[in-house]
Image (tube, rainbow, N blue to C red):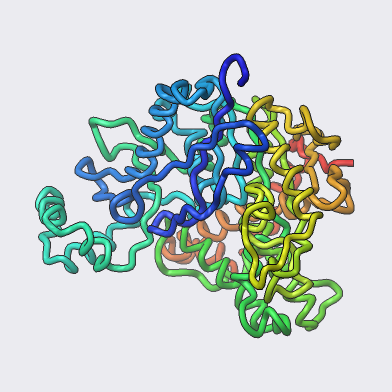
Amino acid sequence: MPTDGYSVLVTFPTGDFDGDTPFTLNPFQMVFKQKIIVVTVAYRLGIFGFFTSMDGEAPGNFGLMDQSAALLWIKRNIRLFNGNEGSVTIMGHGTGAVCVGLHLMSGDWTDDMFHKAILMSGSLLLDSSVRSAKQYASSLDELATAFGCFRRPTTKMMDCLRRVDAQILAENSPPIDWGPVIDRGLSNTTTPFISDHPNMLVHQGKLRRVPLLIGHTDMEEVLELTMGDMLEHGLGAEMFETLLGDVVMGDLAEMDFNETLCGGNMDIVMEAVQYQYKPYPPTTDPVTLRRQYIEFATERKYVAPTIELAMHMSQQADTFVYRFDIKPRTAAALKDIPEWVGVPHNFELIFLWGLPYWLALADQMQWDSADKRVADIVMTLWANFAKFTNPTQVGVYIRWEKFTVTEPGVLIIDRSFNMSDHTTMSFDAVKFWNHYYPSVINFAAQCCNATYNGGNRAALLSGGSLVGSLVLAIVILLQSFVYLHTTHFASPT
């Protein structure tokens, strides 16, 4: 045993905040082979963990507070299990990664309770990851109606809901997508857990200065995005544009402006997205369009947020970034998955938790020895980070360079384990989603406000008019010029 005790890896499980967080992965191989302590944290979910009444009666984020309490317990008690309370790494995948990211900016709630962080396939910086409490206003009305409670005052509604049996409350509540909320100003007695949107907190420098390991797979939600006929035959041109439009509509709906959407401004945003993702020369080939759509979804939801967070964290602590490109060679592990599919969401967990060593396959089939070797390497990299900060400290002969602003290197975890170059990692999409696209969305939303509220003057700013188009062009050109001359972001060589 190390003199100071074993390093501790605290994991927040994958799933979602609304009740689907199963503990299905066995950490024995990681513990046995890497000699670290693994702690898995359970916390309240759904209405019990994230209900908010939009005031001090129930500000919300109780599930996150549970996690904070667990980290405090670990700090005070892990020494009793031969653990080192001075070497605690928090790790999460998917929703768990969002939790880890929120602890990076939670202020006093987790002060000095962990020392490193690992985020895997999580989308912390998306607008939908954290909401304003007022977005649940209509949900509270539904909930009060469903259980025959007075909606106001809030104290009466809370008393009424507390009298409902927990099982009945869980099973009969309206379908509400509970999750983390910005709870600043909701309570006079507790410090807010999330004082602002994560994007704002990141840009304000409200990040805990701890080493970070972060990454994603190369086709995160491919199986969810391409179900049925699309998985086998590809994507038609009309459906391609419809799917892109649905995302744009959703992004515009997240903006805090009048509910009346302006068609011309919708077109402005669509043109920007199509410029980035519509194949050129034009094609209606369904396989090509399917590939473009998967790239669009992965880069928007995973690649760009990952690099954005890494950019900020790397300026204050050691940061390591990866892209996971290895699928298992064992045929049984890839059942019903077409050959063209890359690495879907969750598939890196096969190697991280050493499944080839303990998960029994159907028909007594055996895992390919190559998958066991990859699992050994991945477990070593992650455990090295938890123990030494350097993922390649011992046991592996791999070059994994730190991610920096001027040298944003990414480890491509494939059969070669090489750092990225211009052929394996393009940052054009990162710049589009993190810098250009938000400018277009904001401009479109402002135009929509002006068009709806400003009469004839605002009509000149409508995206559907010539003047509006010229204004947009000038604004975006100026923003692009400023960005290109001020950014420190450089592609790796």
In the image, residue 236 above or below residue 458:
below
Name the spot of residue 380 as percent of width and height, x first.
72, 37
Q: Is residue 203 or residue 122 the one in the foreground? A: 122
Q: Is residue 369 visible?
A: yes
- In this picture, residue 170 sits left or right of residue 258: left
- In the image, residue 180 lies at what x, y percent? 40, 48
- Total marks shown come to 0
Residue 242 x/y as whole percent: 61, 78
Judge from the rendering whether residue 477 lies leftward or rightward of residue 43; answer left or right: right
Q: Nearer the viewer, residue 148 or 41?
A: 41
The quarter of the rendered structure image containing the C terminus is top right
Residue 388: give x, y in percent of width and height: 68, 25
**Which residue is drawn at the image coordinates 88% and 46% (left, top)?**
421
Instruction: Give the residue drawn at x 36%, y 52%.
Output: 45
Q: Which residue is drawn at the image coordinates 52% and 30% (left, top)? A: 206
Quarter where residue 167 is shown: bottom left
Evaluate whether residue 477 shows in this view: no
- Hey, which quadrant is residue 208 in on the image? top right
**Above-or-below relation of 161 to 316:** below
At 50% from the left edge and 49% from the top edge, which residue is drawn?
13
- Is 169 or 183 nearer to us in this picture? 169
User: What is the residue that sits farthest to the top in this orientation?
Assistant: 3
Which quarter of the image is occupied by the N terminus? Answer: top right
Where 305 sits versus 287, above or below? above
